[in-house]
Image (spheres, helix red, strand yellow):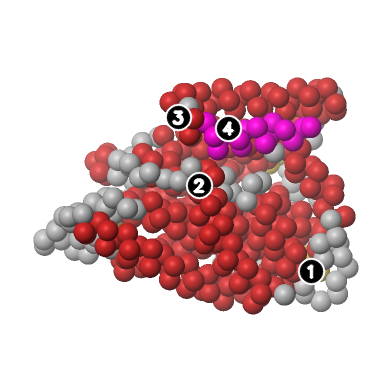
Amino acid sequence: MLCIPFAGLLLCIAVMPLVKPEWWEKHQAHAVILWSLLFAIPFALFYGAPKAVETVLECLIGDYLTFIVLLFGLFCVAGNIKLEGSLVGNPKVNVIMLAVGTFFSSCIGTTGASMLFVRPIIQMNSWRKNKRHIMVFFIFLVSNIGGCLTPIGDPPLLMGFSRGVSFFWSMRLFPVLVLNMILLLTIFYHLDKKAYQKDITKGLMPEVKENEPLIRIKGAHNFLYIVMIVIAVILSGVLPKLSAFQNAAGEVIGIPIFKEVTLTVPAIIEIAIILLAALLSFKTTPKEVRVQNHFTWGAIQEVAVLFIGIFITMQPALMVLKSAGSGLGITEPFEMFWATGALSSFLDNTPTYLVFLTTAGAMHFTTGVATTLGVVPVKMLMAISCGAVFMGANTYIGNAPNFMVKSLSDENGINMPSFFGYIWWSLRYLIPVFIIDMIIFFL
């Protein structure tokens, strides 16, 4: 019963933009408050008010705060970088841009790469009418799949790193990434070629920019601030393991908030560095760069409002998963791949990853990757990692950059698929690729 508010909020996100778009745009926050209260009040009746307050605060302080600050920082810094030039959107150029953005995701995170490349992709294809598929495959590749090679790429891998998985271990996923890129970019090229020919047939033509370089970067100094943010993310995984940030009991030190809820010192350091990077980015970049980027706060506001409700209302589902994870009978790599992926499509992929990593670590394997949770076989750890990172692409809420890319696309007049419409895209193009992954890598 306590999972109903989570399902209700997801249903609102899926249906209301279709049936009452203007109302939904104005009242998203009210819907989030309503469903959050419908979770919190019954939870308090069942477990007591102190437990309810502790659960909500643990979610907000322990998870949501660093999550939204990271998104905010990357959104601000990327908004102050302007990529321009004579490149125009056509199938070959779009394939190259998606490939480059996909590899960048492992270097600066899926959120950073999404915010850096989404505006140039939109601008390059602004002359085209048939272009929603470009942004859908952008979400598939840049916002999700590309983040699998390093702990910087996606938060689940960072959690693995903080629990003993070596920093460069996830480079083992390179063959899986390359295969997925080849398959998805091949599909994309044929889709884009057909759409491109339709646009040309209708008389649409790109503006020819003479005497312009292929690529020119305005606000290039902001890459230093992206590096600052990346360092902050790495520190968030490294500092809690240092004795200087632990008390005598081995717990991470911090500011007590309520009962067991603590804002840790490593989290404070991470937040401070990210906010400083965002501030410096705005202070050192001319306003005209943001004007040329059509920078607005709409996308980050929508993500901040909706995801605070998602984080709060999904707590019962995560509690059930944590308590029942070891009893699900999932013991094979391919089962871990689909179980982790299916839940990561709708729940936060970080705790989902940790649940199945903990489950695998408790199986008493003797060979594989040594973690603080136990030894996990290489193939099983690969399956859990790929499921968590890749299948966040299955829905708009599977990973935060998905919704940000959708919002920015909507702002720029691109008619993106609805919530269920997007799932239909993932069923047609992603799931067959994941089946191939399973057959080749996880059986």
Q: Residue, x 64% and y 46% (percent of image)?
A: 346
Q: Report the side of 252 relative to 393 (left or right).
A: right
Q: Residue, x 46% and y 63% (percent of image)?
A: 102
Query: Which circle's residue, 3 or 1, is located before the other in the chain?
Result: 3
Q: Amino acid at mark 4?
A: Cys
Residue annotated with mark 1: 332
Query: Which circle's residue, 2 or 3, is located before the other in the chain?
Result: 3
Q: Amino acid at mark 3?
A: Pro
- Mark 2 vs mark 4, foreground winner is 2
Q: Amino acid at mark 2?
A: Gly
Q: Report the side of 46 relative to 422 (left or right).
A: right
Query: How many residues crowd around disc 4 within 10 Å: few (fewer than 14), some, or many (20 or more)?
Result: some
Q: Of helix, strand and loop, which one carries label 4?
A: helix
Q: Of helix, strand and loop, which one carries label 3?
A: helix
Place of residue 51 in the rendered image (x, y in percent of width and height, measured from the top left)? 81, 29
Query: Which circle's residue, 3 or 4, is located before the other in the chain?
Result: 4
Magenta stretch in the rendered image? 1-16
64 over 433 or under it: above or below: above
Q: Residue, x 69% and y 31% (percent of image)?
A: 5
Q: Report the side of 335 relative to 308 (left or right).
A: right
Q: Amino acid at mark 1?
A: Glu
Residue annotated with mark 4: 12
- Residue 110, can we see it? no
Please tell me which residue lies in front, 392 or 51. 392
What is the CA distance from the residue labelled 3 to the residue labelled 4?
A: 11 Å
What is the CA distance from the residue labelled 1 to the residue labelled 4?
A: 36 Å
